[in-house]
Image: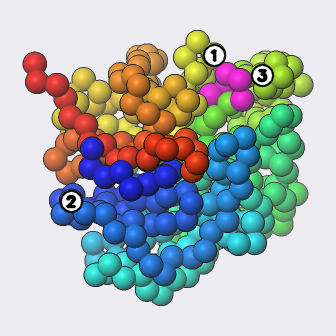
Amino acid sequence: MIASEFSIPWGVAVFGEDELLITDRLGTLYHHKNGTTQPLSGTPQTYHVEFAGLIYGGLMDVSLHPNFDTNRLVYISYVGIQGKMLVARFKFQDDTIDKIEIVFRSNSFSIGSRIEWDDHNHFYVSQGLGGNPYPEPGPQNLGNDGGKIHRLHDDGQIPQDNPIFDTITGPTSIWTYGHRDPQGLFFDRDAGVLYANEHGPLGGDEFNIIYQGKNYGWPLHSYGKNYDNSEISTITEEEARTTTVLPEKHWDKNINVAPSSLLKLKNSNFTLWNGSFIMGSLPQQRLVTYNLQSGKTEIVLENIGRVRDIAQLSNGNLIVLVDAGSPNSSDRGRILEIWPKEE
Ligand SMILES: [Ca+2]
């Protein structure tokens, strides 16, 4: 264990030898360096709601600009005091936050979010809208920023080559729509492909390849069911195949992943996992790998806790963020470093 002063650690960014920036959903950004963890002051105020003992909204992801080493720019996604999701960036130097700018203003709340970068200094940000107890149509509504993956220039401008949808006159921030709650985004620089996973309701967790401008189906079609066991889909799989993008892989109730975070391992110390995607699983408290070539899903570590985010350190070990479930829990959220067993 590296640190345990958290409630719901949500996102982690790694830089240098072993420095970390860690978000806690309740609104604090931490800097971990040389074995100590300090809260940073000057971050924007956040807003969260509590429902059935769990927290939604608040401070979510943290991500470094691809040129962070020279420009020191850090990006965070969060729900602001107006109750809507924002992405802010700031300069981070000598434990000080400076020049905060809002680079994305969404028009709705978010229950989960990740930030990821392509190789042209665009960032993607996902915004989850969920749907409980019944699907809500927001993800299909291009006027609602929730249930979408957005794509923006690093300064927040909308790229001119973003999709232009029928109902909208010019390019918007929306890259793809029809998502439920995408909490893992990974851009594979070798392949130039963006991947995302998302939470289904009861079953129906998905792994998707993200294609510009496409509809990912929620809540028109899902392999999962509503929490009261009623059907979600109003269309058949064959109909969904012609009008939406079906997931590359979906998991049913037998291996409910409830995925948070997504990372494709390369040159990690876990040689058997390299080339596979690794994900955390929330209620099942596992680490799960998925190999796109073989199609195989494997539970590689059990009983680790409610995994929120995973990152790779420069030494090849992995960092795993584990949350305490509820802020009222006597447990603490923790950061773990894991490495392979000696053979
Ligand atoms: Ca889908």
The residue that appears at 58% across and 21% down in the rendered structure is: 256
Residue 251 pos. (x, y %): 59, 20
Disc 3 to disc 1, C-alpha distance: 10 Å
Residue corresponding to mark 2: 35
Q: Is residue 43 left or right of residue 34?
A: right
The residue that appears at 37% across and 63% down in the rendered structure is: 21
10 Å crowding of disc 2: few (<14), some (14-19), many (20+): few
Q: Nearer the viewer, residue 121 or 283?
A: 283
Q: Is mark 2 within 8 Å of ligand 1?
A: no
Q: Secondary structure at mark 2?
A: loop
**Circle 3 or circle 2, nearest the eye:** 2
Which dot marks residue 253?
1
Residue corresponding to mark 3: 225
Disc 3 to disc 2, C-alpha distance: 44 Å
Do we see residue 53 in this rendering? yes
Q: Earlier in the sequence, mark 3 or mark 2?
A: 2
Q: Amino acid at mark 3?
A: Lys
Q: Secondary structure at mark 3?
A: loop
Query: Among all residues in the image, which is located at the extreme front?
Result: 330
Which residues make up the magenta segment? 201-207
Q: Earlier in the sequence, mark 3 or mark 1?
A: 3
Q: Nearer the viewer, residue 231 or 290?
A: 231
User: Looking at the figure, which quarter contains the C terminus?
Assistant: top left
Residue 106 pos. (x, y %): 72, 66
